[in-house]
């Protein structure tokens, strides 16, 4: 058995976003601006970033509208202050990734993506961007919280500890 000092950890952070937050997330995730205030970004390593869900950069707001148009079955109009997207950040500690090859790191994120697709529904996913250009590799998985059971936009029903 290893001592606690040698143990790595898995981290998964989930957050809800309203429509006015989406553009900023797109700019950050797809590195659309060189004016980031995040000092951990190494622009020389940005080429190593990848999206497990999309082949090319996308317009997040447009994708959200498409997902809602296909999946939303509610009878009421969607509120202007509704949660239209959630972000799940998946990572571990830097020591964990330092022990893995780039291929093994990608496998870690591919398996995490596969699990989250099953949790949230692949058709609800906006993007699954892996950032390799920061201090510690991590994935930002964004999805539209359309409840598969009733077709409603329900972030709180989908983001319970039992589901995540």
Image: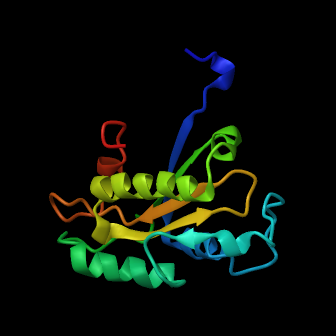
Q: x%, y% of residue 77?
A: 28, 74
161 relative to 44, above or below:
above
Question: Residue 50: horizontal and vertical position, in percent?
Answer: 57, 71
Is 161 above or below relative to 4?
below
Relative image position of residue 127 (x, y in whole percent): 46, 70
Which colour style is shown? rainbow
Q: Residue at x 46, y 69 (%)?
A: 52
Q: Is residue 2 left or right of residue 61?
A: right
Q: Is residue 132 visible?
A: yes
As rendered, which of 45 and 158 lies closer to the eye?
45
Tell me, yes or no, if residue 88 can be seen here. no
Asked if 92 appears above or below 130 in the picture, the reply is above
- In this view of the protein, which residue sits in the foreground, 104 or 12? 104
Q: Residue at x 46, y 64 (%)?
A: 142
The N terminus: image quadrant: top right
Q: Position of residue 85 (x, y in %)?
A: 44, 65
Task: Give the left or right position of residue 88, taking residue 125 as reference.
Answer: right
Q: Nearer the viewer, residue 134 or 160?
A: 134
Which part of the image, by quadrant, shows the C terminus?
A: top left
């Amino acid at each position: 058995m290893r001592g606690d000092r040698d143990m790595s950890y898995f981290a998964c952070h989930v957050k809800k976003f309203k429509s006015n937050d989406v553009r900023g997330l797109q700019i950050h995730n797809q590195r659309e601006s060189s004016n980031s205030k995040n000092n951990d970004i190494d622009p020389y390593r940005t080429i190593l970033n990848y999206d497990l869900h999309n082949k090319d950069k996308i317009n997040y707001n447009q994708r959200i509208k498409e997902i809602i148009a296909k999946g939303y079955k509610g009878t009421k109009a969607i509120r202007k202050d509704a949660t239209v997207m959630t972000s799940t950040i998946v990572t571990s500690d830097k020591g964990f990734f330092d022990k893995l090859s780039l291929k093994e790191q990608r496998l870690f994120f591919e398996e995490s993506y596969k699990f989250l697709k099953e949790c949230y529904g692949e058709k609800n996913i906006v993007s699954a961007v892996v950032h390799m250009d920061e201090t510690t590799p991590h994935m930002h998985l964004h999805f539209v919280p359309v409840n598969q059971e009733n077709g409603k936009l329900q972030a709180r029903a989908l983001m319970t500890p039992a589901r995540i």
